[in-house]
Amino acid sequence: MPEKTLKKIIAGRKLEISHPGRVYFPEAGITKEEVVNYYEQVWPYMQPYLKNRPVTLHVYPRGIHGFSFYRRDVSGDLPPLARTVPYRERSREKTIQLLLVDELYTLLWLVARGALEWHLWACTADDFEHPDQAIFDLDASADTPFEQLLEVSLLLRERIEKDGYRALPKTSGGTGMHLYVPLPRKQTFEEVRHWVKEIGRELAAAHPRLLAAPGSDHKTHSQKRVLVDYAQNSLGKNTAAPYTLRAYPDARVSAPLSWEEVEKGGFRPADFNLHSMPVHLKKGDPWLSNISSQ
């Protein structure tokens, strides 16, 4: 018999989810229905980070081991009331429609169609020229001790604070770490990218055992050293959203952290996953008081 369609009522609107039992994470036995339920649970925490910010989707229609594609232009295939913003792509001289997610229904409608990972731009839809956050993307090889990334994160926090900014840490959802720095939207992408690059070079020179100097080739790791990748600070680039799932067999999540958690250590990225994240959030969002820029 064909599998029944799952029906949910979201803010008074009916949402139909086909193939709810389709396994999206085979190793963990996690189904599409569980993925939809996860995003419904974390929506109150995820929503502030999505507000008025362009989204790029990574879509896995048949689970993490099936084909996948990135979706930036959402022209023509959205639910009613979904909001978009026009964006002129300079490389192709074409205007596309970028997705803005204001409400839960749109998010779940897209999750039900395979939108597993949610990636955000570093600027808001009302100003494409001036980012409101800098992103320090800490990359390392899989055999680099995670404690080393935490150590580098603490060094970066100290250096960033010397310039009068605050940094917010989160796991990338892969093997790395992200540090977000709220900005007052005065600098261009080029200026922010240069700042991130120079801090990475400065710390690599001071701590060559821990960090590799960022180079023009954007090499992601070198000899178990951490690289501060500055390339994400470019118009059109996107980074894993707070609380998004990632396409790893253990269904891990890109998890905001407190600095106390970073200092204490003793955890691994996979500790934050589809099952554990809603429980972890009962303590609240560690970034809650820091999400607005100066």
Image (cartoon, helix red, strand yellow):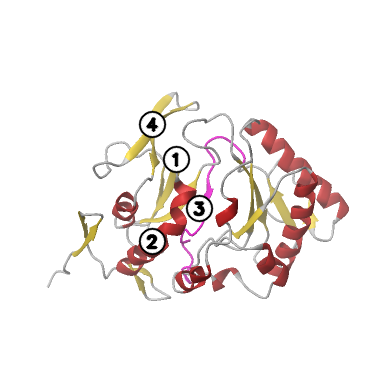
Look at the numbered disc 1 and give the secondary structure of its residue: loop
Q: Residues within 10 Å of mark 3 (few under 14, many from 20)?
A: many
Alpha carbon separation for disc pair 1 and 2: 19 Å
Marks 4 & 2, CB-CB < 8 Å contact: no
* Image x and y of residue 139, in percent: 66, 56
Instruction: Indicate left or right for 254 with 6 as reference.
Output: right
Q: Is residue 44 left or right of residue 19?
A: right
Is 151 placed left or right of 247 in the picture?
right
Q: Which mark is in front, 3 or 1?
A: 1
Q: Between disc 3 and disc 1, whose residue precedes?
A: 1
Magenta stretch, residue numbers: 233-251
Residue 6 x/y as whole percent: 20, 65
* Label 2: how many Cα within 10 Å (few below 14, some 14–19, many 20+): many
Quarter of the rendering occupied by the N terminus: bottom left
Please tell me which of labels 1 and 2 falls first in the chain.
2
Give the answer, above or below, for where 45 lies relative to 146: above
Q: Residue shown at 63%/33% (left/top)?
A: 189
Q: Main secondary structure of the magenta part?
A: loop
The image quarter containing residue 96 is top left
Q: Amino acid at mark 2?
A: Tyr
Q: Which residue shows up at 63% across the image and 63% down it?
A: 258
Query: Which mark, by number, is residue 52?
Result: 1
User: In this rendering, does residue 4 appear at all?
Assistant: yes
Tell us which disc is closer to us: 4 or 2: 2
> The residue tagged with tag 4: helix, strand or loop?
strand
Residue count near mark 1 (Cα–Cα under 10 Å), binned few <14, some 14–19, many ≥20: some
Residue type for callout 4: Ile
Query: Dot 4, how many residues are within 10 Å of its Cα: few (below 14), some (14-19), or many (20+)?
Result: some
Q: Provide the residue designation for mark 2.
A: 39
Residue 153 numbered mark, or none: none
As measured in the structure, the alpha-carbon distance from the residue carrying label 3 to the one carrying label 1 is 13 Å
